[in-house]
Image (cartoon, grey):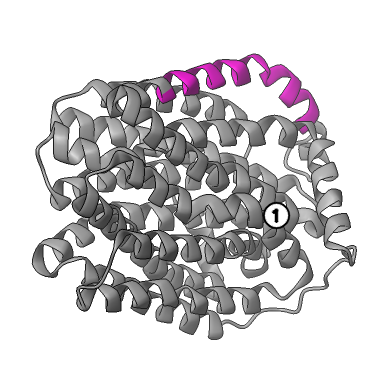
Amino acid sequence: MIHSLRAFRHRSYRLFFLGQSLAILGNWIQHLAMSWLVYRLTGSAWLLGVTGFSSQIAILVLAPFGGLWADRIDRRKLLLWTQAAAMAPGFTLAALAYSDAVEVWHVVVMAGLFGVIMAVDVPVRQSFTPEMVPVREDLPSAIAFNALMQNGGRMIGPTIAGVLIAASGEAMCFLVNGVSKVAAVVTLAMMTLAPVARARVPSSLREGLREGIAYTWNSVPLRRLLPVVALVSFMASPYQTLMPIFAAEVFSGGAETLGFLIGAAGLGGMTGMVLLASRKDIRGLIRWIAAAAGAAGATLVAFAYSTSLALSLAAIAVVGMNTLIVAMSVSTIIQTIVDDRMRGRVLGLFTVAFLGTFPLGSLAAGAVASWIGATHTLAAGGGACMLVALWLWRRLPELRAHIRPIYARLGIINE
């Protein structure tokens, strides 16, 4: 177990983990408060889908540019700017809610602004990890703990949000998120990092992006794994958008029930990240990806048709665990095998696949749920994930043949 903590040997990563843990906790508190506020004001599955779409659509469009900027500009300075900018939506919504002037369109617009900021922040933050953890053997531990932060926030944040909403309303949740970004800025400012020599990137944005796309397409592992992440995210992740419907209509609960359901998914994600952090190296991860995609799909179907809160909490925890294992396993492979000069751009494309497809899935899920119901919508998504897993499993021999020479060149395995 000790080797899973190797990332914390590095002071900069310890500071990063502290600041980002608080910032991500704030993100999830705000996320639940926005969803609950929209559902309380409208009771509309469609508007829940629109809010989820608004919060993530910018990632689909702008994340590749964020990755390109990460290859060009000092990543720590970029993160200082994005975390400072992320204070604005929280403080704005807090002011509107405290003055009792908040309307649905305010939430949608602020969700969109936050999405624009995150579209730049996420690929920069991911590509920044090797600068804080320059020892290759410690990198899988750092990537797993990055995901652990996300899922710790998803587990604890909604629970805190449910308590805050019940005690004082949504405004306090928005204020807490704004304050959490101050901690992220302070810890980033405290870091001391070795200078990093940046490879030359084409001056034209178009050429830089074209180079990143060509590099990704010409790598068989990347060409196969990124679509798997995109499809699992599109089909499985909309459960987050539709969760208020299950909390209110299936279990006759309120914000507290919603917090427990989303928190269970976060607990599952944390479990998955502990499993990944405990691995000694990245060999065998592709098998994990295929198995996790299938397990996520099967348990999503179980969640969709469950009327027992205990069973649903267990099922959604397994969904959360396996969807994150899929995404973070692919992220670990990318950050291990991709050339340093291309890392930001490839991670920008990964961000599109993982987070950029979420708004499309949210919008589609909201529309389909209005037609056939939330239950059948999630069940269909689970079935699609199982088909994706089968497709990947049949291509394991091809992927092994292409990835083994890369692992041998990097000294991960001995030929």
Q: Is residue 401 magenta?
A: yes
Q: Residues within 10 Å of mark 1 (few under 14, many from 20)?
A: many
- Along the viewing direction, whichever of 355 and 272 lies nearer the viewer: 355
The answer to whether residue 194 is left or right of residue 129 is right
User: Can you see residue 104?
Assistant: yes
Rendered view: 169 above or below 307: below
Residue at 47% from the left image edge and 84% from the top image edge: 186
Q: Residue type at mark 1?
A: Pro
- Along the viewing direction, whichever of 101 and 61 lies nearer the viewer: 101
Q: Which residue is mark 1?
A: 64
Spot occupied by residue 301 in the image (x, y as percentages of width and height): 33, 21
The answer to whether residue 222 is left or right of residue 322 is right
Residue at 42% from the left image edge and 55% from the top image edge: 150
Secondary structure, mark 1, is helix
Residue at 50% from the left image edge and 79% from the top image edge: 84
Rendered view: 182 above or below 47: below
The answer to whether residue 79 is left or right of residue 322 is right
Please report the bounds of the magenta region as a residue range.
381-403
Spot occupied by residue 189 in the image (x, y as percentages of width and height): 55, 85
The dominant secondary structure in magenta is helix
Name the image quarter holding the C terminus. top right
Residue at 67% from the left image edge and 52% from the top image edge: 347
The answer to whether residue 197 is left or right of residue 83 is right
